[in-house]
Amino acid sequence: MAPVPQVLRVPAFRTVWLASLASNAGSWLQIVAAGWLVLELTGSPAAVGGLAMAARAPAFVLSTWGGSLADRHDWRRIGIVTFLAQGVAALALAVATWAGAASVALIYALTVVLGVGFAIGLPAMLALVPALVDRPLLPQAVSLNAAGINVARLVGPSIGGITLAVAGAGACFALNAVSFLALVAALVVLPPIAAARRRGGGSVREALGHVRRDPAPRRLLIGMALFCALAAPLQELAPVIAARLDAGPVGLGVILGAMGGGAVLGAWLLERATGAGLARHVALPLATVCFAGGLAVVAASPWLPLTLVAMAFAGCFWIWLFAGTNTAIQLSSPPELLGRMLGLYQLAVIAPIAVGALLAGALASLAGIGVALGACAVLLAAWGLWSLAHPVPGIDRAPDGQVVPATSGGR
């Protein structure tokens, strides 16, 4: 049996990580049920893409504010309030669905509420990680967080698809509401010292100035934004992919689960590749090109088994982008700017996902899902190849100029 990762021997981190795993799995039940319900009510791929916009539109205006809050206030309290708000919204959607009142407009409105809580709370939760573990364990903590998200991606959609088929969308929404309580409870019992390391305040302009002056965070944020805009349609339009393959709600869960399974494998591969000396400034564009290959296969595939293999392959490199970029920003950002830099990171993730899914959904409505995903694959491959040809080695350096190890081992 493999040894327990060193970072999971830290009680505070272990508690938050396990609770986050439950909450992330619950969120996937919500995503599966809401996407399928909207497609069932409208028959429109564009409407499914619009749901992604509703979930992530709050990030356009709230991500940087959430980062500023994380630099001024208690991370734990921010998390408790925002997760409670998301739980209430999910419960309201469950009740409305059971009552037969879940219109598309109501689904969109409550999805926006969930998005507001997520946009405000995420920078604080990301900034909490360095307070829970010592700096040498931070790369492993970030990688394990990403792996946990993708374990949830593996389990959540599958459970969501089965729950949707057996008990309906309302049950999925209710389970998501309950899952938020696990994370709230974990934050409530968190030792005060873990959330009491105070940072400085200040405006977002300071973080933007840092990005303008330093090519490393600039490349990280631009690369993340382009990747999310062009890669996210694979995930956000999964109900449309399932409908094209006549896979049904269970098939939808399996399709998303395959991507999550690939991501779990990808986290393992990333730790070993970086441990063997693969630099982040090379790993990130390499993963972009590989993901584009998997995306192209999904775009062209008429068979469910081939689609599942391609989804798993794409998921393997999906996690490379998120874990690698998040780790690089956490390790390379000046401590006084950490919350605001994570707010910018969140903005570079969520806003492009919303825009990309909306545009890809509109294109899929006009020309088909294969054309939409194929166009995204071509553009993504072009960006990845350009990035490989124009590397930014500073991505692997800390604020003091020292090279930051890509991984801390610990397994």
Image: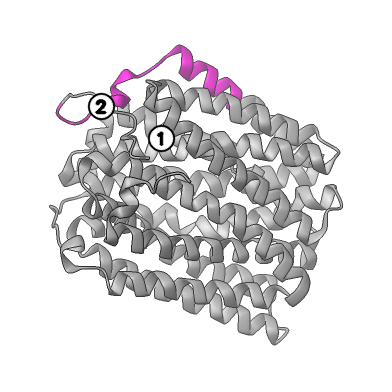
Question: In the rendered structure, which segment of residues is drawn in magenta?
Answer: 380-400
Q: Secondary structure at mark 1?
A: helix
Q: Residue furthest bottom?
A: 99
Q: As rendered, which of 104 and 380 lies closer to the eye?
A: 380
Q: Which mark is residue 88?
A: none
Query: Which residue is pictured at 30% across the width and 25% down the height?
Result: 396
Tell me residue 401's x, y (percent).
17, 24
Question: Hey, what amino acid is under mark 2?
Answer: Asp
Q: Secondary structure at mark 2?
A: loop
Q: As rendered, which of 181 and 299 lies closer to the eye?
A: 181
Q: Is residue 143 above or below residue 278?
A: below
Q: Residue furthest front?
A: 1
Q: Is residue 24 above or below residue 148?
A: below
Q: Is residue 42 left or right of residue 152?
A: right
Q: Residue furthest top?
A: 389
Which image quarter is the C terminus in? top left
Quick check: can you spot residue 359? Answer: no
Q: Which mark is residue 214?
A: 2
Task: Based on the picture, tell me whether residue 395 belongs to the magenta stretch.
Answer: yes
Please name the colour scheme applied to the rendered image: one colour
Q: As rendered, which of 266 and 49 lies closer to the eye?
A: 266
Tell me residue 202's x, y (percent).
16, 51
Tell me residue 199's x, y (percent).
14, 53
Residue assigned mark 1? 324
The quarter of the displayed image where residue 50 is located: bottom right
Q: Is residue 115 above or below residue 67?
A: below
Query: Which residue is pictured at 40% across the width and 21% down the height?
Result: 278
Query: Which residue is pictured at 36% across the width and 75% down the height?
Result: 185
Q: Main secondary structure of the magenta part?
A: helix
Question: Hey, what amino acid is under mark 1?
Answer: Gly
